[in-house]
Amino acid sequence: MTISVRPLTPTDRTQWQPLWKGYLDFYKTSVPPEQYDLTWSRFHDPAEPMFVLGAFEGETMLGIVHYIFHRSCWTAGPYVYLQDLFTSSDARGKGVGRALIEAVYAAAKAEGAARVHWLTHETNARAMVLYNDVADRSGFLQYRKVL
């Protein structure tokens, strides 16, 4: 399988949206329809620090990654939060997730970022096999309060 990764353009929405819905379904959550519109518009707004890449085999999108640049009190350069990573079920285990993560690493390095970080659910054992190979597990636990 030959995988290419590139930033998505406005014409890619019809392939992006089902993949993002698949990601949300995997985590048993949803967002209202207007959030799809808002998120998509943010990816294409040069004033926003949010980005989206797609992994393709030919013209078929196999996976997506969303990532966000943000400041850190600890470094001069930004950090990058890899927020959402999803690969279609038929493409899993074929290097798509790795290619997307490596593309985020390259984008982060190009902008002088000091770190790329992300979260996954403790039950996402299949993904953690890849994550343990491409990154270091920090040992930190996430706490949050939904407002």
Image (cartoon, grey):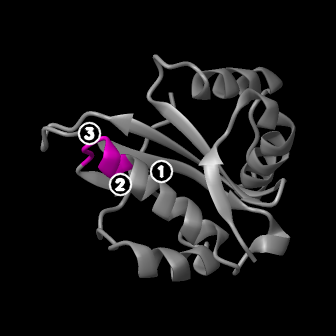
Structural crowding at the residue carrying mark 3, measured as other residues with C-alpha within 10 Å and reported as few (<14), some (14–19) or many (≥20): many
The quarter of the displayed image where residue 138 is located? bottom left
The tag earlier along the polypeptide, 2 or 3, is 3
Which quarter of the figure is the N terminus placed in? Answer: bottom right
Tag 2 near tag 3, CB within 8 Å: no
* Residue bearing the label numbered 3: 78
State which region is magenta. Answer: 108-113
Relative depth, front residue between 89 and 94: 94
Marks 3 and 1, how far apart at CA: 13 Å
* Residue bearing the label numbered 2: 116
- Badge 2 amino acid: Val
* Residue bearing the label numbered 1: 82
- Badge 3 amino acid: Pro
The quarter of the displayed image where residue 26 is located? bottom right
The tag earlier along the polypeptide, 1 or 2, is 1
Relative depth, front residue between 109 and 23: 109
The quarter of the displayed image where residue 39 is located? top right
Tag 1 near tag 2, CB within 8 Å: yes
